[in-house]
Amino acid sequence: MTKPEASTVEKQLVKKPFKLFDFFYKYGTILTIALLILIFTWANPAFIDGNNLINILRSISIVTIIAIGVTISLSVNGFDLSVGSTASVANAVVISMFVWYSQNMFVAILVVLAAAILIGLINSLLIVKLRIPDMLTTLATMFIIQGIALTYTKGATVSENMVMPDGSYATGVISPLFVKMGQVPWIIVVMLVVVIVVHIFLTYTKHGRYMYIIGGNKEAARLSGIPVNKYKTIAYLLSAVLAAIGGMVLASRVMTAEINAGSPYLMDAVAAAFIGFSVLGAGKPNAFGTFVGAILIGILSNGLVMMSVPYYAMDIVKGAVLAFALGLTYYKQK
């Protein structure tokens, strides 16, 4: 055996040193979930009850769906901050289609999806054609969409038998089939279908791989012949559509359209998407990681409620988790 060959064999036999940071980067989220389950179960044995676990899955369904949309925008190195407002519009429009206009479920969903596509097109037009930075664009459209939702509903809650501006009562009713979408197990099924479909799309299709290439190096992707603008447009369209689906699931769950109902989901969705970067060492936005991130946030919220932590302190914990996730993500990228 020659010296170079022996050297190669020796290098292959030398084990890589164990790095504690890399271990926690890959498995930290899963270990944290396991630790939280143990702590909350110790504090209140009812936490591990089957009904409560199903309640956690139900509670994260809307966050997960919206967060998957954020994940797709992140895959092309974008960032969609308008998802919460888009969910609010979807919530208001779908309920109003039933209550104000007595439309069937097919028409109601179609109108909402059309509105979501329009929002996605506006975002992508401003970002792709006018080249306004993603975060600034979607921050601006977030306020615009929020204002449209408030104007559309006139700042009122939309519900069955509501009082109309002329003093009469709304006569439309929400479709019973639509209501089922917000109930267990269908709300969980919708969430899992979204996670699986987007995971397959991003991981196993050429379109998903193109999005990751664009997110990694836009100029290299362009030189490779990948239509960068086309895929960025697709990313923002999908993000808006998923936010709208989240808004419709929220509507079917509560059967009303509250003012800015989707806005509170923005921070949780962003946190879940960024936590997902580190799950199993992915190092990139991915649907499975986002789902795990949403589970972590759901367990935190549920456990803190069961421990009687005041609701106004919840954002402190969520903000700390998001800061930790961002710190891990960007430190690793550095």
Image (tube, grey):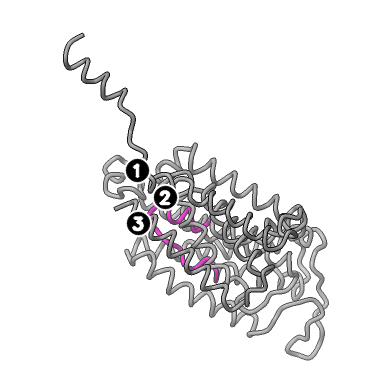
Q: Is mark 1 on a helix, strand or loop?
A: loop
Tell me the residue at 55%/78% (across/down): 148
| Mark 1 surroundings within 10 Å by alpha-carbon count, few (fewer than 14), some (14 through 19), many (20 or more) | some
Tell me the residue at 66%/73% (across/down): 92
Gap between marks 1 and 3 measured at Cα: 26 Å
Q: What residue is pinned by disc 3?
A: 330
Q: What residue type is labelled 2?
A: Tyr
Gap between marks 1 and 2 measured at Cα: 8 Å
Q: Which quarter of the figure is the N terminus placed in?
A: top left
Tell me the residue at 30%/27% (across/down): 14
Q: What element carries label 3?
A: helix
| Mark 2 surroundings within 10 Å by alpha-carbon count, few (fewer than 14), some (14 through 19), many (20 or more) | some
Residue 268 is left or right of residue 231, and the answer is: right
Quick one: which residue is furthest to the front in this view? 42
Say which label, 1 or 2, has the lower sequence index: 1
The segment highlighted magenta reads 69-85
Asked whether the viewer can see residue 245, the reply is no
Q: What residue is pinned by disc 1?
A: 226
Q: What residue is pinned by disc 2?
A: 231
The image position of residue 224, as x and y in percent, is: 29, 40
